[in-house]
Amino acid sequence: MICLNCKQTFEGDYCPHCGQQAQTKRLHFIEMINNFVGSFVGGDNKFLCTCRDLILRPGHMVRQYLLGQRIGYYNPLQLFVFALTAYAILSYVLGVSNSIFDEMTVLDFETETEPSKYASLDYILHNITKLSSNKLYGAIVLALFASVAYRQVFRKCKLTRCDGRQLALNLTEQFYAQMYHSCIGLFLSVVMLPLCLIPGLDDVLTIVYQIIDVAYIIVLYRQLLGIKWWKSIVLNLIGLFLAMLLFLVVLMLITVPAGVVEGIQSRG
């Protein structure tokens, strides 16, 4: 066989130089579907194992991933893209307003209003609600702010590596843990999306979603860091509060100056 990738001659099913499969078919539609499906439900069951462990034992799975056992799991960014795509497709099929594509403009700047309005708490909270409710913006932005807050709150809680070293989670590791949390939030949204078709359930679904979401991250960090229940509950509530506070401060620093400039320009 001559490898179509590196042009080396070899015998067997795989090229020993680059690892490409010997039998490389031409690209057709069926091949595209098989590649797509195979990437999630292939022989190694990587996607199914990631979803199963992330649901049943989230903290253990995230700890294994952060400590280096990564070949058997999808990284959270890959999983997030898949969950986001599934949510968008299902919302389109059901005809339910999805908070991804309806409003891609996040911040509202009204051109005919007093500049002082942009400094008001109601205006800032309006933009926070709009940003956080968007599945695309909200998940990533909140994960970034939560990473900073959780890095400080959980700085004394450490992971034990196989070599015995005690390490606190850095910002990137906190971000990965938060993105896994966001992935579960999206999958939960996918499951609850058909229920949105039932009139009058919006408020109930929102409360149920928030309860499950907070309970999940409490379980995740308890298993991840091996801490007691009460400690995970207290530290998570503090971390969520600090994340929202940081979110509020940063948004104020963005919206107030930008809104005032926009208002002044519209008047000019």
Image (cartoon, rainbow, N blue to C red):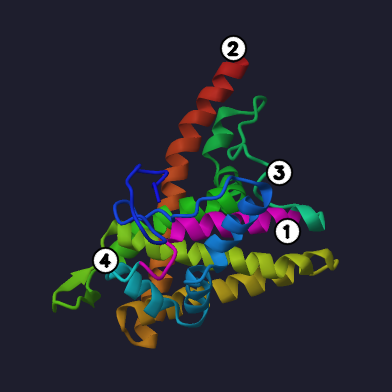
Q: Distance between the residues labelled 1 and 3?
A: 15 Å
The span picked out in magenta is 71-91
Residue at disc 3, secondary structure: loop
Disc on the earlier residue, 3 or 4: 3
Spatial CA span between label 2 and label 4 = 50 Å
Measured in 3D between alpha carbons, the distance from the residue under mark 4 to the one under mark 1, in whole angstroms, is 35 Å
Can residue 133 be seen in this snapshot?
Answer: no
Q: Which residue is disc 1 drawn over?
A: 90
Give the residue pinned by disc 2: 268
Report helix, strand or loop for mark 1.
helix
At horizontal 58% and vertical 75% (from top left) the residue drawn is 211
How crowded is the residue under tag 3: few (<14 C-alpha within 10 Å), some, or many (20+)?
Answer: few
- Reply yes or no: does residue 45 show up in magenta: no
- Measure the C-alpha gap from mark 3 to mark 4: 36 Å
Mark 2 is on which residue type?
Answer: Gly
Q: Do residues under tags 2 and 4 come within 8 Å of each other at their CB atoms?
A: no
Residue 261 on image: x %, y %: 51, 23
Looking at the image, which residue is at 31% across and 62% down?
173
Query: Looking at the image, which is closer to me, 174 or 6?
Result: 6
The amino acid pointed to by label 3 is Asp
Badge number at residue 169: 4
Camera-nearest residue between 51 and 94: 51
**Mainly helix, strand or loop, the magenta region?**
helix
**Disc 1 marks which amino acid?**
Leu
Labelled pair 4, 1 in contact (Cβ < 8 Å): no
> Is tag 1's residue or tag 2's residue first in the polypeptide sequence?
1
Q: Quick one: SS at disc 2?
A: loop
Q: What residue type is labelled 4?
A: Leu
Q: Is residue 198 visible?
A: yes
In the rendered structure, are the residues bearing label 2 and label 3 in contact, judged by CB atoms less than 8 Å apart?
no
Q: Residue 8: horizontal and vertical position, in percent?
A: 32, 46
Q: Please give the residue where the numbered disc 3 appears in the rendered image.
A: 102
